[in-house]
Image: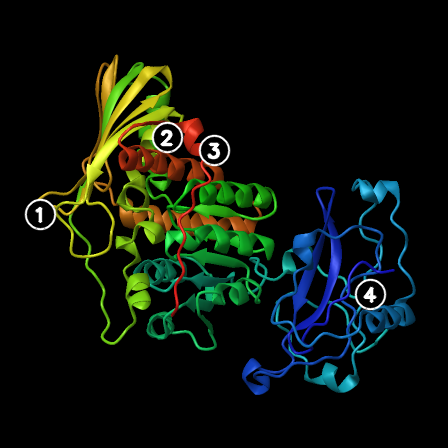
Amino acid sequence: MPHSFTNIPVHAVFGMMLLRKNGVDFEERYIWRILPPASRAGRRYAAPIPTACAMGFPLPPASRATRGQTPAPASRADFASTLIALFGGAKKQDSASKHHKAAPFRTLYPWQLGGDILQRMKQHRRSFIKAAAASAAGVMLVKPESVYGTPANSAIAIGIVGCGGRGLYIGNYFLQHTDAKIVALHDPFTDRLEEAQKRFQASGIRLYKGLDGYRELVNSALDAVVIESPPYYHPQQAEAAVQAGKHVFLAKPVAVDAPGARSIAASADKAQGKLSFLVDFQTRAQPVFQESARRVHEGAIGAPVCGQVFYHTGRLRARNIPNETADQTRLRNWMFDKALSGDVIVEQHIHVLDVANWYLKAHPLKAYGTGGRKARTDVGDCWDHFLCTYWYPDDVRIQFSSSQFLKGFHDMCIRLYGTGGTVDSHYGAAVNITGDKPWKGTEKDDTFNGGAIANVKAFVESLTTGKLVNNGAQGAESTLTSILGRMAAYESRVVTWDEMMKSKTRFEVKLRL
């Protein structure tokens, strides 16, 4: 019996084939548009169409995901009888194919479509056909690079989950600095969807509304999902995207609690070697910070002893829309909400703690903290300042402080003192090393924009070249570092890394929009 049968809209999908690359079997789909989408808007076809080659190789689960919306279900028996009548039964899997040692694919069976459809068919991918498709018994051979979403054809198709300020910002970079195209948007608010559609100036973008609308988006026809929603939702959205076989570009922090961060680590592990999973930390993408970290790791400051890490900045602007419900206002102002954001130490101040981990090549072993809510009390429930001490391996101690209410001062600093020198690095500003091995890095770095652009470009390049990127585990570790400090501060006691990792405490958010 053939491996898989799927009922697919006739106007969206033409055929597929099974290929071998580097000894691994994989399925390639070829998308054809018979008529412009607008001419058949909303129409689905329930005609049973076999969509698997009668092969003896197992198909990866991720490759079975159907592109496009799923039409009304048809009988699997109909699929089976149709395929057997056309092509005959599949060969049984032998031990060689089971271990990917069999010869490359042997046969590709073409779609058997009526002549009227063939006449209207338009080529949708360049370099797709080299043989005539008029004969129902013909065989079509296609080069591997002619697949959906690779350099040999049209641009990478992305969907954005979360169309607030960051979603618009990152979306613009995908359009300005890569060949990617935005094909789908999700947000709980209609006005944000409309603003995003207007900003991106692209017709035909699919819009998904509601808190659970992202599920439809990740299962629609696209290559990658860009997640720019409130951090509370990141774990479930990333998991859904990976489950649907989509590449993930994820905003920091990856979660708001330890169970959520562990979920992200699991999703990233599941994506390993199959999908790109990139967490957007700008500092790690900047050459000057990369060089600074390299020098620290090679001993430019000697053995690290202690350090100062801080993120001090002004307050953010609240967003209030007349006549909205309390839950709608809460969601719009998620950055002031502990459960939705993880509090300021997790949502925003993670940037500097991430670099501390990077420089020290480790996460902290324990933390003690304090802090409070004293200057900004008019919105939300987040604290406005934190003071923590982190203990790293080799008894390296880091003094951490942060705030989000200041006037007249702003700085994001990672300063590490060693036995032979000091690395003094600032997000968006100077990065230098003084001491026995001085190094003049820069007096000004465009970390915010430059790092985001570099990450966007690296992400798309990984999809087009097949050289996948995955820093999900590192993103989860940095998020957990922030969560460790928050737990210690909330409870005003020493909390160990192991204790935090065992925590089952979850933030719970139930909104009615």
**Quarter holding the C terminus?**
bottom left
Q: Which residue is mark 3?
A: 502
Whole-Å distance between the Cαs marked 3 and 4?
Answer: 52 Å
**Residue type (three-letter) at the residue carrying disc 2:** Trp
Identify which residue, 20 or 169, lies in the foreground: 169
The amino acid sitting under disc 3 is: Lys
Residue bearing mark 2: 358
Label 2 or label 3, whichever comes before in sequence order: 2
Label 1 to label 3: alpha-carbon separation: 39 Å
Percent across and percent down for residue 493 are 29, 28
Q: Give the Cα separation between the discs numbered 1 and 2.
A: 30 Å
Relative image position of residue 167 (x, y in whole percent): 36, 60
Q: Which mark is residue 100?
A: none
Identity, as a three-letter code, of the amino acid under mark 4: Tyr
Q: Residue 109, which numbered label?
A: 4
Taking the image as shown, residue 355 lies to the left or right of residue 225, namely left
Mark 4 to mark 2: distance in Å? 51 Å
**Secondary structure category for the residue under label 2:** helix
Q: Quadrant of residue 46?
A: bottom right
Circle 1: residue type: Lys
Tell which of 157 and 232 is nearer to you. Answer: 232
Disc 1 or disc 3, which is closer to the eye? 3
Viewer-side label of 2, 3: 3
Left or right: where does residue 457 sit relative to residue 467?
left
